[in-house]
Amino acid sequence: SKLGDKGTRADESQGSGTGAGGSGGLWVTFLLGTTLIIMCVVGMSGNTYTLIVTRSAALRRTGSMYVYIINLALADLLYLCTIPFVVCTYFAHDWLFGEAGCRILLSLDLLTMHASVFILGVMSLERYRAVAKPFSAHKTSSRNRRLVSGIIWGLSFLLTLPMMVMIRLREGKPTVAGSVKRICYPTWTPEAFKAYIIALFFTSVLVPGLVIVGLYAGLARRYWVAQANLGGSSHSARRTRLKQKVVSMIFSIVVAYWTCFLPFWGWQLAKLFSPESLKALSPAAHNYVNFFVTCLTYGNSCINPFLYTLLTRNYKDYLAQKGQKVLKAFFLDKILNTRK
């Protein structure tokens, strides 16, 4: 999702003087690079761990959406894999990975961005169906979920194809030292590029985001009504606590989604449709805002393992079962050693 970051990083750095030796200072470059590397390590560790525990027999038996969770973790892993290339480009102020790198890495951004948000939407839909239509929800098999996942990846690839076809590597303006920087640049007209960016905003943020908000709002309403219909004053305190817990969980998921993606897209759309309003910002400020909103999009891939797997009841049950096995093995070993 770093449409303005990979494609213009080298070009911006040529004239701005920012970076390791410019006005931004070496410590700022180091701080931003370190932040992304930490996010890469944390995010890849969390998603890799998610893949390992989700494929366990215990979670496969108890978790109805493990297929989606695996696909979500894979999409997040692919997305986080682009961080080293972003960091390298930011430090070098040049694109070092050729035209194939432009096509693959920029397309990988869009592919995983769409796959992630579509999977989150399908997961939200299944959660809603499990509450609204519990009997029909149980009929969804793992085979059908794998089919849906395949369709999601195919649709995401189709939405990414225009970027893959139209992106090219070109040489920028020579620097004062005479060196030439390379940048990834879309070859279509400005009007066509604006239309494509708007389409991406609708397909990757606005429409899926509104669908997810609507589904969770419907979930909250159904939980609220169901708890209110339980009746009996003795259960009023318990109902209140349950309402607060459900609403807080839903609110956290929705806020995390919008917080991670809206600033990035707001910045991209502002640069495209209102560049005059951003002229008051210095070139260094432009670079820092680019980096900040990019970090937010990566942040979503870092927190997904915690929101959708590591904090769920099934995962806690899995840990409890593993803990019981470890304790049994420990005490059995103690008994055998004592008898010896």
Image (tube, helix red, strand yellow):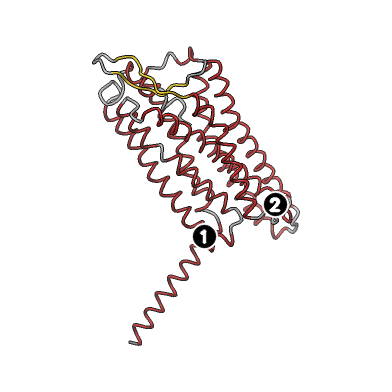
**Percent position of residue 22, x then y:** 27, 21
Looking at this view, name the residue that lies furthest to the bottom.
339
Say the numbered circle drawn on residue 79.
none
**Percent position of residue 33, x then y:** 33, 34
Q: Nearer the viewer, residue 278 or 142?
A: 142
Relative to 256, say whether 90 is above or below.
above
Which residue type carries mark 2? Val
Using a 10 Å C-alpha cutoff, classify the residue at mark 1 as few (fewer than 14 neighbours), some (14 to 19) or many (20 or more). some
Residue drawn at x 54%, y 30% as measured from the top left: 161
Q: Circle 1 — which element?
A: helix
Relative to 145, say whether 9 is above or below.
above
Q: Nearer the viewer, residue 282 or 84?
A: 84
Q: Quadrant of the C terminus?
A: bottom left
- Quarter of the image where one finds residue 154: top right
Using a 10 Å C-alpha cutoff, classify the residue at mark 2 as few (fewer than 14 neighbours), some (14 to 19) or many (20 or more). some
**Percent position of residue 82, x then y:** 41, 37
Q: Tell me the residue that label 1 is attached to.
A: 316
Gap in angstroms between the C-alphas marked 2 and 1: 22 Å
- Quarter of the image where one finds residue 97: top left
Residue drawn at x 50%, y 43% as measured from the top left: 75
Q: Tell me the residue that label 2 is attached to.
A: 131
Pointers 2 and 1 in contact (C-beta within 8 Å): no
> How many discs mark residues in the rendered view?
2
Q: Circle 2 — which element?
A: helix
Relative placement, left or right, of 305 versus 96 is right
**Percent position of residue 78, x then y:** 45, 42
Which residue type carries mark 1? Lys
For marks 2 and 1 on the same chain, the one whose residue lies earlier in the sequence: 2
